[in-house]
Image (cartoon, helix red, strand yellow):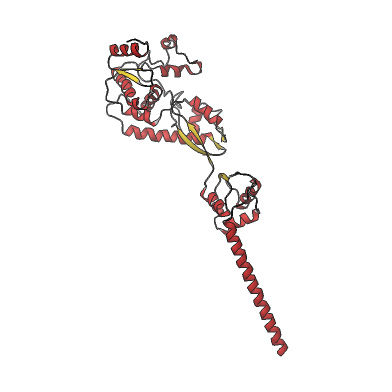
Amino acid sequence: MGRRASWIRRTAWALGLGVLLAALLAAAASWWAWRWLDQPLPLRQPVVELSVEPGTAPRAVAEAWVRAGIDTDPRLLFAWFRLSGQAARIRAGSYEVEPGVTPRTLLDMLVQGREALLTLRLPEGATLREWRAVLAAAPDLTSASAGLDDAALLAAVGAAADGPRWAEGRFFPDTYAYSRRVSDLTVLRRAFAAMQRHLQAAWATRAPDLPLKTPEDALILASIIEKETGRADERALVSAVFINRLRIGMPLQTDPTIIYGLGEAFDGNLRKRDLTTDGPYNTYLRGGLPPSPIAMPSLASIQAALNPAASKALYFVARGDGSSQFSETLDAHNRAVNKYQRGGR
């Protein structure tokens, strides 16, 4: 009986010691794991990039990070993803990490979708043809629009063409952020939606009694203002000149429309024969607005088109310093031309 009691005591002590050791080991493991979550992960290069495709399993994401350059055991990363309860919330996208990233901040980035974005400037005053060249040269931007004509391009961004050059001027110039390997159509869809939004908002605050029948008319005039304006503070005055001409039926007589009509045939020199050759964009020979915008206008030019300055000016001429001289009569305009363009007194 005594030996049995002694064996029971020894067994209980051993079990107790085992439980204690297991608890200590679990505590140590928990402490190590908790500390590991906030320790910088070793990287095999200064910047590690990874594109997570839609539908990628969390285990595959962990393994892909290790292949890309995070020097750790992928099983640890996957265990952290799973035990955090957020593995199913990892988002697709293009990501990059730098020294200092920890398992915790890595998962936060993936769950919040904080992608490594590139930026692209689509400039105001440029044509769609020029924008296409900018898009084609943008790094890590997939070119899906290269083989599309204007009508097909509009269809791809969710719009319908009303004419052969209806795509011109319909996209808002701005700086756009995009993730790596996204389609250029994604950028253009955003630019198209932004232009629609800005144009409708500006149209709602237009001045009364303008000789512009539709928002599209405003867009056409805004594109001309964009090309004719050397200084931002003169946009409303340039607008007033064209609005005044439209009101009295006077041709707009603006060189940028003719240059646009010439397209790639324009060699930098506008000749007299260009002014006297009829065509839909020759605003010397044809009254009213041309059939489409001639460039991508800025918001400032759109607002100027719809809210011209209170001026009776019908003419303007460049002074040579970036500003313009505005005149109400042809005689005053001729004197300004003689002074600023011909060096007269």
In the displayed structure, 52 sits above or below 37; it is above
Identify the residue shown where x is 31% and y is 11%: 335
In the displayed structure, 252 sits above or below 108; it is above
In the displayed structure, 224 sits above or below 284; it is below
Image x and y of residue 309, in percent = 29, 26
- What is the number of callouts on the image? 0
Q: Pick whichever, 252 or 211, lies toward us.
A: 252
Image x and y of residue 161, in percent = 45, 28
In the figure, is residue 78 to the left or right of 266? right
Image x and y of residue 231, in percent = 37, 25
**Residue 252's quadrant in the figure?**
top left
Q: Is residue 213 visible?
A: no
Q: Is residue 31 visible?
A: yes
In the figure, is residue 187 to the left or right of 58? left
Task: Name, please, the residue furthest toward the bottom.
Answer: 1
Q: Pick whichever, 158 or 233, lies toward us.
A: 233
Image x and y of residue 277, in percent = 43, 10
Identify the residue shown where x is 43% and y is 16%: 258
Looking at the rendered image, the quarter that the C terminus falls into is: top left
Looking at the rendered image, the quarter that the N terminus falls into is: bottom right
**Residue 85's quadrant in the figure?**
bottom right
In the displayed structure, 193 sits above or below 2; it is above
